[in-house]
Image (tube, helix red, strand yellow):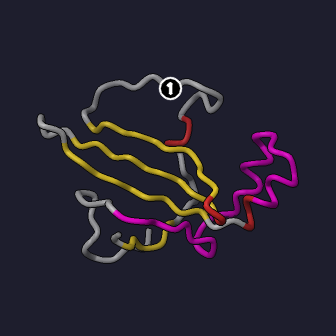
């Protein structure tokens, strides 16, 4: 991951843009998932931006909220993670590990906003 030196795991706040030049192509992964060619082509042309918001609650537990957006303001999924080591049930279409697995995806630096 290419990120400024001041960005650490303790401060992920900011906007992160997927670097297409450093990432593996998404098309083969989407094809394996049965996504049709037209949607795969649109996804390959889009720029994906993620906004990470990191907070702590009164018990000191860290919470991370990731909002995804594609070119043109198309909203993607919003993920919320609670970093307390408690088991999390995965449900929905993704099954298995779900979107936690991001093999081959590299992100460009964060821009604080």
Residue 47 image point, x, y percent: 63, 67
Please, which residue is most extreme toward the left here? 59
Residue 67 image point, x, y percent: 47, 51
**Secondary structure found at label 1:** loop
Residue drawn 48% across and 72% down? 108
| Quadrant position of residue 80 | top left
**Residue 97 vs residue 9: left or right?**
right
* Magenta span of residues: 14-42
**Residue 83 vs residue 74: left or right?**
left
| Label tally | 1
Image quadrant where one finds the C terminus: bottom left
Q: Residues within 10 Å of mark 1 (few under 14, many from 20)?
A: few
Image quadrant where one finds the N terminus: bottom left
On whether residue 97 falls in the magenta region, the answer is no
Residue drawn 57% across and 71% down? 19
Residue position for label 1: 90
Residue 18 image point, x, y percent: 55, 66
State whether residue 81 is above or below residue 26. Answer: above
| Quadrant position of residue 14 | bottom left
Looking at the image, which is closer to me, 50 or 1? 50
Residue drawn 74% across and 48% down? 30
């Amino acid at each position: 991951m290419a990120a400024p030196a001041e960005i650490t795991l303790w401060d992920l706040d900011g906007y992160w843009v997927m670097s297409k030049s450093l990432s593996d192509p998404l098309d083969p992964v989407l094809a394996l998932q049965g996504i049709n060619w037209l949607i795969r082509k649109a996804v390959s042309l889009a720029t994906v931006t993620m906004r990470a918001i990191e907070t702590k609650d009164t018990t000191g537990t860290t919470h991370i909220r990731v909002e995804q957006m594609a070119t043109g303001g198309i909203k993607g999924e919003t993920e919320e993670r609670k970093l307390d080591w408690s088991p999390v049930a995965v449900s929905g279409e993704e099954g298995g590990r779900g979107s936690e697995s991001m093999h081959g995806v590299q992100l460009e630096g964060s821009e604080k906003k």
